[in-house]
Amino acid sequence: MYLIKKKRVLHDSIFLMDIVAPRVAKYCQPGQFVIVRIDEMGERVPLTVCDYNREEGTVTIVVQTIGASTLRMKELNEGEYLHDFVGPLGQPSELITDDIEEVKKKKILFVAGGLGTAPVYPQVKWLHEHGIDADVIVGAKNKDLVILEEEMKAVAGNLYITTDDGSYVRKGLVTEVIADLVEKEGKKYDLCVSIGPMIMMKFCTLTTKKYNIPTIVSMNPIMVDGTGMCGACRLTVGDEVKFACIDGPEFDGFKVNFDEAMERMKLYRTEEGRAMLKLKEGDTHHGGCGHCDGGDK
């Protein structure tokens, strides 16, 4: 059982929790994720690591209520417990594993869309702690959905906030901010890291490609099982088949087939769609999710 040490509501549908999980806190890195279950019969919910405190043995997660399991999780309070908190899973960000002296030479831009601010934050914080200030763009539908603003201000070199409806700071899409930074302010970047909704990452990548800025994207939105068994997060990266939960969740955005990934997301939501994907993909589909006749492929 894992104690909920702290809970903070960020929005009607978004909340933050600090979970006491010493072994996970000891080893997790920015870019990785955990799997959470409320009880023995609960759904496995993959959630990216938002922060961690190795000394206190806590891991911070940010959750949006999009289904029954996350709604039940929202009803839990400080002092209560989660049944399972498994991790760290997935691969850490390359910025953390690459040679630090080489990383220091790069001008880095982060683009966070909505809940994507949560997994962007630990990467920016890690860089800041190692003397590297990165620019950060945070986009949201409206002012109420801008999260972790003060935390991000404390670690970002420059923070640019934009809202779809113009209710806070400026009106426009994150892609427009990228264009303004490059074309109007003369900014030059060696790398962009984009995390958020699939459609946002797709168009962010199309924009950065125009400016020849190598771009990393996180495919955590398509994860379901989190262990590579269910096939939900199967995607094509270049000429290779990858799985977001075990090979990622971060990949070269220029190589990701976003249209294919988004179409698979739609199909995977129905029993007929899952059956069709299993038939079509055969041995590369993976199985064991409980939705594919208990499949062994």
Image (tube, rainbow, N blue to C red):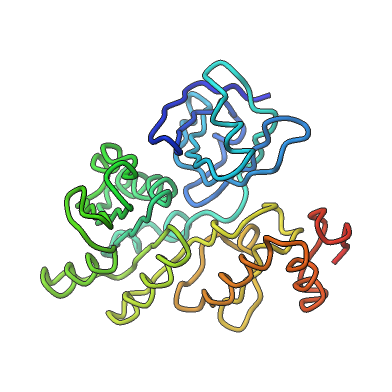
Drawn side of residue 167 relative to residue 47, left or right: left
Which one is nearer the viewer's eye here, 156 or 203?
A: 203
Residue most extreme to the top = 79
* Image coords of residue 218 (percent x, y): 49, 61
* Image coords of residue 197 (percent x, y): 45, 60
Residue 74 position (above or below residue 135):
above
Quadrant of the image for the N terminus? top right
**Among the 4 quarters of the image, the one containing residue 20:** top right
Q: Residue at x 83, y 61 (%)?
A: 292
* Image coords of residue 129 (percent x, y): 32, 43
Drawn side of residue 111 relative to residue 262, left or right: left
**Among the 4 quarters of the image, the one containing residue 139:** bottom left
Residue 106 position (above or below residue 207):
above
Which one is nearer the viewer's eye here, 5 or 281?
A: 281
Drawn side of residue 110 relative to residue 5, left or right: left
Quadrant of the image for the C terminus? bottom right
Which one is nearer the viewer's eye here, 60 or 206?
A: 206
Which one is nearer the viewer's eye here, 106 or 101?
A: 106
Drawn side of residue 107 relative to residue 290, left or right: left
